[in-house]
Amino acid sequence: MAPPIAARAQQMPASPIRKLMPLADEAKRRGMRVIHLNIGQPDLPTPAAMRRCLDDAPEILAYTPSGGTPEYLGTLQRYYAGLGIPLDDREIIATTGGSEALLFALIAVGDVGADALVVEPFYTNYSAFATMAGVRLVPLTSRGEDGFHLPARAAWDAARTPATRMVILCNPNNPTGTVYTREELDMVAGFCRDHQLFLISDEVYRELAYDGRTAVSALSLTGIDDLTVVVDSLSKRYSACGIRLGSLITRNGEVHEACLRMAQGRLSAPGLAQLAALGAEALDPGYFAANTATYQRRRDVLFAGLQTIPGVFLRKPEGAFYFVLRLPVSDSEDFCRFLLEDFALEGQTVMLAPAPGFYATPGLGKDEVRIAYVLNEDDLAEAVKVLRAGLTAYREAGRA
């Protein structure tokens, strides 16, 4: 008999976004149409200018530099310069998606056993990356009634432990759709500065801020240049999730050097992805504004529809393309399973992501789901109809 696998491996959490996929696949085999609101996979086309770059792929798909090709790093420098954030190419590392950037950052700034403060609900895969890195997530709970904005400074001071080494923040936020204000971010910057804590800022959804809002980058905060690590990605910005290309950005030379050695250990980020990324610079200047307007319309359609369902609670999301929805159920995972296994409306059902996996505090999120509004407005309107009927059927079945 083989020995037990590592404790770290046993502790790896299942993804609430994907763990119900076998049920969705089975529903499709039964002829059901499943409307996917569980995962942030946009239906907008990846820009043709990026896809055309692959026509120029070299005959030999060789290793690229561990830190990224000069051409790709150059596009990032120019992108950030357009945001008023000048960067040296020695402050950027190409990564295999934002996921690898997060993992590198956790390993670089926290030893095994370190604590990371994180605002819950949070992107569920933070739990997976923290488990890989041997880091413990210490949650500060945000409230739906407050639009999931940040807790006051006193809560941060109370949550800090002797083992705290970092703060993880996602802005605009996945899963809540919250866009933090400059005042909130200045408060976090002051907290990190006062206690010499690293700030890992996940800014993958930077362009998606609605109703005239602007997402403030941690790279523009005062007095924490050497404490800031920014995680970024092309996935959502260019509707290119499968490209698996991102970046880690830091002005801290030691952190950069440590992450570069990790990058050398995995050899290189995808070369074809870096080639495709060059096409982003050929996009129309209005590209981001058009995408943002599209997602804002989708948000408005879904928000208006969901507000007509009795017992549902949410504040209007401010950015990204997610929100956390409170439902009149006692077990959101059971309800999500019910939709896929036992319910249909005109041959359709909806797949949602149960919210407990987006929390670190046991018991929270039991009546919540995360919804991604990455589909066209007609599909979102259909999803509202299905969800309304599904809640009624669930209650009539005595399972609410």
Image: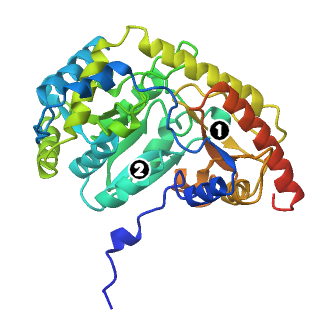
Q: Which amino acid is tagged 1? A: Gly
The residue at the point 67 percent across, 48 percent down is 368
Q: In x, y percent, where is residue 332?
A: 69, 55
Rendered image coloring scheme:
rainbow
The residue at the point 25 percent across, 14 percent down is 81
Is residue 364 shown left or right of residue 126? right
Query: Up-down: is 73 above or below 7?
Result: above
Query: Up-down: is 211 above or below 15?
Result: above
Question: Can residue 193 be seen from the camera position used here?
Answer: yes
Question: Hey, which residue is sitting farthest bottom in the picture?
Answer: 1
Q: In the image shown, does 325 or 116 lie closer to the viewer?
A: 325
Q: In x, y percent, where is residue 22?
A: 57, 60
Nearer mark to the viewer, of 2 and 1: 2
Q: Quadrant of the C terminus?
A: bottom right
Question: Hey, which residue is sitting farthest right in the picture?
Answer: 396
The count of marks equals 2
Query: Up-down: is 279 above or below 58?
Result: above
Which dot marks residue 144?
1
Q: CA distance from mark 2 to mark 1?
A: 20 Å
Q: Quadrant of residue 385?
A: top right
Is residue 276 shown left or right of residue 346? left
Say whether disc 2 or disc 1 marks the residue closer to the N-terminus.
2
Q: In the image shown, does 399 or 219 lie closer to the viewer?
A: 399
Which dot marks residue 126?
2
Q: Quadrant of residue 322?
A: top right
